[in-house]
Image (cartoon, rainbow, N blue to C red):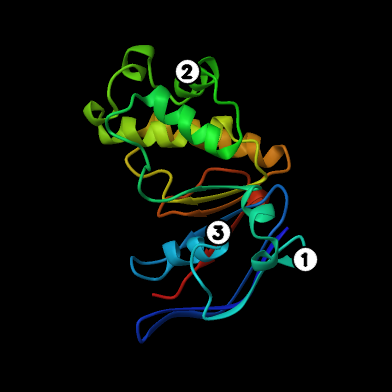
């Protein structure tokens, strides 16, 4: 279980949010919504331990994430709003590197299967990532989720640049993750078509 208690976030002299509380339990996706600049990305980075808290606590299974350090980060997959891919590498090579760093299966065959699962054909898999469309690049980044065995996913606008087919594929992957006892925190502008009991919305003030 992930808990954020009485969190405050400020950018310069401007307070983005304060007194924020959220609990993420197995089988639940928390959708973070709000206007641009409301602090959605900052909140996700705080939950990952990448951004310090002005005030409040973040606990994983009852222990502050600052005390857990690597023990916590080894149980989460984080995907920012940038794809985090290298343009000169192929999609397969990019996915192998990210899988290796995450301790997931980094074999060529597993990378190819994950890329096929997100709708990236074998021809595109062998091209330099720089020549792909924005939607294809996003699929390369999201293919990490098809290899991830970690309990907690923290994702920033994962649906960005995806067409309807990509949205459907990602939604189905979310469902399998939650059905297996996984958890997710997702910043999004899009409604996520999952069973009502699987999704909780948290709106940040504008």
> For the residue labelled by badge 2, is the local secondary structure a helix, a strand or a loop?
helix
Q: Give the crowd class for mark 2: few <14, some 14-19, many >=20 residues within 10 Å.
A: many
Where 42 falls versus 18 (above or below)? above
Q: Report the residue at 47% width, 50% height from top.
A: 191
Q: What residue would you read off at disc 2?
A: 112
What is the total number of numbered labels drawn onto the structure image? Answer: 3
Q: Which residue is mark 3?
A: 48
The x, y position of residue 193, in whole percent, is 53, 43
Q: Residues within 10 Å of mark 3 (few under 14, many from 20)?
A: some
Task: Work out how far the residue at label 2 is from the one at label 3, CA to CA, in angstroms.
Answer: 28 Å
Q: Earlier in the sequence, mark 2 or mark 3?
A: 3
Q: Is residue 61 above or below residue 13?
A: above
Residue labelled with disc 1: 62
- Alpha carbon distance from label 1 to label 2: 38 Å
Considering only order in the chain, which callout, 1 or 3, is on the residue closer to the N terminus?
3
Instruction: Residue 137: give x, y in percent of width and height.
Output: 33, 33
Report the side of 26 relative to 37 (left or right). right
Residue nearer the viewer, 34 or 143: 143
Q: Secondary structure at mark 3?
A: helix
Residue reaching furthest left?
131
Q: Quadrant of the N terminus?
A: bottom right
Q: Which residue occupies the extreme bottom position in the image?
A: 13
- Residue ID at (27%, 24%): 128
Nearer to me, 61 or 30: 61
Crowdedness of circle 1 by 10 Å Cα count: few (<14), some, many (20+)?
A: few
């Amino acid at each position: 279980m992930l808990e954020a208690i009485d969190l405050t976030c400020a950018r310069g002299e401007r307070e983005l949010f304060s007194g924020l509380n959220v609990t993420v339990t197995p089988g639940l996706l928390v959708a973070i919504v709000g206007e641009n600049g409301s602090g959605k990305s900052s909140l996700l980075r705080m939950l990952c331990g990448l951004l310090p808290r002005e005030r409040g606590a973040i606990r994983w299974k009852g222990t502050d994430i600052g005390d857990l350090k690597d023990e916590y980060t080894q149980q989460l997959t984080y995907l920012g709003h940038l794809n985090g891919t290298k343009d000169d590498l192929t999609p397969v090579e990019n996915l192998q590197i990210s899988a290796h760093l995450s301790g997931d299966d980094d074999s060529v065959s597993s990378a190819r299967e994950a890329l096929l699962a997100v709708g990236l054909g074998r021809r595109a898999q062998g091209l330099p990532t720089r020549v792909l469309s924005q939607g294809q690049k996003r699929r390369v980044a999201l293919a990490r989720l098809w290899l991830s065995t970690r309990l907690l996913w923290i994702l920033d606008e994962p649906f960005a640049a995806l067409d309807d087919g990509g949205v459907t594929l990602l939604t189905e992957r979310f469902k399998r993750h939650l059905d297996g006892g996984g958890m997710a925190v997702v910043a999004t502008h899009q409604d996520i078509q999952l069973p009502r009991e699987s999704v909780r919305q948290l709106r940040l003030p504008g």
